Image (cartoon, rainbow, N blue to C red):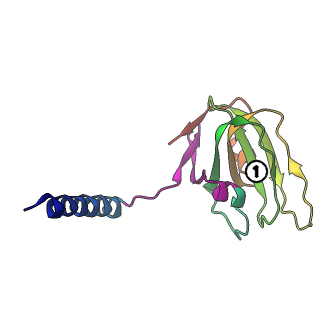
Amino acid sequence: MSNKIFIPTIAAGVIAIVIIFFIFNNYSPGRGSVCFNKFCFEVEIAKTQIELSMGLMFRKNLDKNKGMLFVFNKEGNYPFWMKNTLIPLDMIWINENSNVVFISENNLPCEKTICSSINPNQNAKYVLEINAGMAEKIGIKTEDIVIFR
């Protein structure tokens, strides 16, 4: 068999194996868990510019133990707003050392043309959005350590 036929055949076989592996292992990119003590949230992970911009906009509900984790390339000051967000949220800013540095609770949807921003007083690398009231319910406080899974 010549190299012109052999190499593409091997490449196709490798691609097929990779696809089968991901299908049978329920591969789900952009998902993970964020844990506080013994309580974990299942999260969608927003990393791309489009994901970071859209966030939870236009979502009509969010299950109790679910959320969205925004992951930025570097630590910085990242204000958030509730424009086009239909559900009340708690927002938790987390630094690169996995410490909670700022919490904004019970943020209500903004139905105005111009919405105010929630500006943290600390730099963060991550922001977690969860249902309003959950931060208080499970006792999340600044300086808590977060475990990412």
Quarter holding the N terminus? bottom left
Q: Position of residue 10 (x, y in %)?
A: 19, 59
In front of the other: 5 or 123: 5
Is residue 45 shown in magenta?
yes
Q: Nearer the viewer, residue 21 or 134?
A: 21
What x and y, as percent, mark residue 105?
A: 80, 48
Q: Which residue corresponds to mark 1?
A: 90
Judged left or right of residue 115, residue 143 is left
* In this view, 88 is above or below 73: below
How many callouts does the rendering have?
1
Within the image, what quadrant is residue 86 found in?
bottom right
Q: Quadrant of residue 127?
A: top right
Q: Residue at x 90, y 59 (%)?
A: 115
Query: Which of these two is toward me, 98 or 13?
Result: 13
Amino acid on which the number 1 mark rests in the picture: Asp
Q: Specify whether 102 is left or right of 95.
A: right
**Which residue is at the front of the view, 28 or 103?**
28
Crowding near pointer 1: few (<14 within 10 Å), some, many (20+)?
many
Q: Residue at x 57, y 42 (%)?
A: 35
Q: Which contiguous range is marked in magenta? A: 26-52
Residue 123: give x, y in percent of width and height: 75, 33
Residue 31 in the magenta stretch? The answer is yes
Q: Residue at x 84, y 59 (%)?
A: 108
Q: Toward which corner of the image does residue 126 lie, by quadrant?
A: top right
Q: Secondary structure at mark 1?
A: strand
